[in-house]
Structure formats: C-alpha cells, structure tokens
Image (cartoon, rainbow, N blue to C red):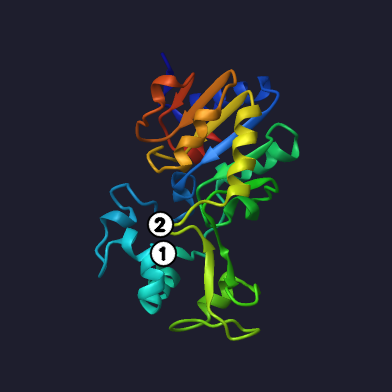
Amino acid sequence: MAHVVTDPVRAAEELRLRVDNATHAVFFGGAGVSTASGIPDFRSEDGLYHQRFAYPPETMLSHGFYETHTAEFYDFYRERMICLDAKPNQAHVKLAQLEREGKLDCVVTQNIDGLHQAAGSRRVWELHGSVHRTICQRCGHVHSAEWVLGTTGVPACESCGGPVKPDVVLYDEALDERVIDGALRAIASCDLLIVGGTSLVVYPAAGLIRSFRGDQLVICNLQPTPQDASADLVCACDIARAFAW
C-alpha cells in the first residue's frame, strides 16, 4: 500500500530522501506542474475544459479543426496556448538543479510550454511538442512563439509564404516515434520514477509509465490517479511545494 503524505513539508523531505537514494531518477510530468506558473490545466475546476468557448477545447485543438477552421484555430492557439509571461516555478527549478547535480536523468513531459527548458533542464522529452516551434510545412523553416503572437489570422511562413503549423501534437495526431522511444528507454532504465502534476488518464502518454520496472514509484498530484495504489509514495499536495528542498 502506498505511503500517502498530504503535508508539503513532509512530502519534500520524503521526496528528497528517495532522490538521494536513487541511482537513475526520471521525472514524468503533466499540466499540473505548470499551474503554479499561472498556466491553466485542462481538467481541474478552473481548467480549459470547464470554460465556455465557441467550440469545445478538444475540438479546437484537433488536427481536423486546424485543417478546416485554421483561422479560428490560430485565434484560440494565440489566446490560450501560448503563455510567454509564465515563469518556471519551484518544481521546474528543482528538477533542473537535480539534472545539473547528476541526480536526474531526464524529464518526460506532456506540457508544451517550454518551462522545463526555461528553468535550465537540458534532457527533456516533449511528448506533445512545444509552442516555441511553429514549422513551415513547405520549407521547414522554424518560427518562434513570439513570431506567431505577432501575426493575425492565418500566418504564413516568413521565408517562403507556405503554410505553418505549431510543432504540437493535436488531437487525432500520433506522437513522435523518436520521442516516444527516448522516453520509454529512460523510464524503463530508471530506478526512481517521479510522476507529477498529471491525472494519468491521457493516453497514449499515460501508458508510458507501464514500462517502469524500477524500485520506487512516487506520484505527486493533488487529485488521486489510477496508479496511486501501485506507488511507493503518494504526495497529495501542491507539486511546487513538494519540490521546495
């Protein structure tokens, strides 16, 4: 049975102890990692799925909507998906520090905000891509998020005028096989897997943790997840505070 801790100070102590005792640690994170940075998640009470839009968010973030309602897609994408004012929080900062100290092999993230890299993490597997790359479908030129925000309507490549698409995995699109392979190998080879800020209900990303065969599984999430019973430690508290050590 999992050891459940709700006090963030105690959770930080327990988490630090497990990291110190691990040889190869990996962090697997979701939207809850970035909520302390002011980026809304999808499924919580204040998340995108509980807000009113002309279309459901999952529709507007689908490949089909991008193809058939491109202008509306980019209006929503600029307003809701690019959050350049957001800064890394304590969880991002601590994970980057642990990587520099050789205590963390890599980060596997479902987030597209780039905050792990902004905090200094270098080995990051971005399962769903990043808003910081928008790629021309004709010539391959990569545009920044700042460039996208400076456009209106349907943007066109600044190099060739071709159509551009954010380098994010939309609904109805497959994950990048290279990224999946790297994430799977990292999770399968670590002895400590820390899962944080994710409900573990979004597949196929959530299914990656099934490859974990190590000694210690830690889950840090405010709400229960389907994998809590399999964890050695559950930190049922704010993830930024759990990494305050």
> Could you tell whether 159 is left or right of 41 in the image?
right
User: How many C-alpha atoms fall within 10 Å of the one at disc 1: few (<14), some, or many (≥20)?
Assistant: some
In the picture, the quarter occupied by the N terminus is top left
- Residue nearest the viewer, comparing 127 with 12: 127
Say which amino acid is labelled 2.
Asp
Q: x, y (%) of residue 125?
A: 61, 47
In space, the residues marked 1 and 2 are separated at their CA atoms by: 6 Å
Tell me the quadrant of the picture where the C terminus can be found: top right
Residue 89 visible in the shown view? yes
Q: Quadrant of residue 137?
A: bottom right
| Residue at 38 percent of width and 62 percent of height | 62
Disc 2, SS:
loop
105 and 208: which is toward the camera: 208
Q: Is residue 9 visible?
A: no
x and y percent of residue 121 in the render?
67, 47
Closer to us: 62 or 239: 62
Horizontal and vertical percent position of residue 86: 52, 60
Classify residue 98 by image quadrant: top right
Are the two marked residues, 1 and 2, in contact with CB atoms closer than 8 angstroms?
A: yes
Q: For the point 71% across and 31% down, which residue is it?
A: 103
Q: How many marks?
A: 2
Q: Amino acid at mark 1?
A: His
Q: Which residue is mark 2?
A: 172
Q: Which mark is residue 63?
A: 1
Of the pair 171 and 37, the residue shown nearer to us? 171
What residue is drawn where x is 57% and y is 52%?
A: 176
Looking at the image, residue 56 sits to the left or right of residue 75; the answer is left
> Which residue is most to the right?
101
Q: Is residue 176 above or below residue 104?
A: below
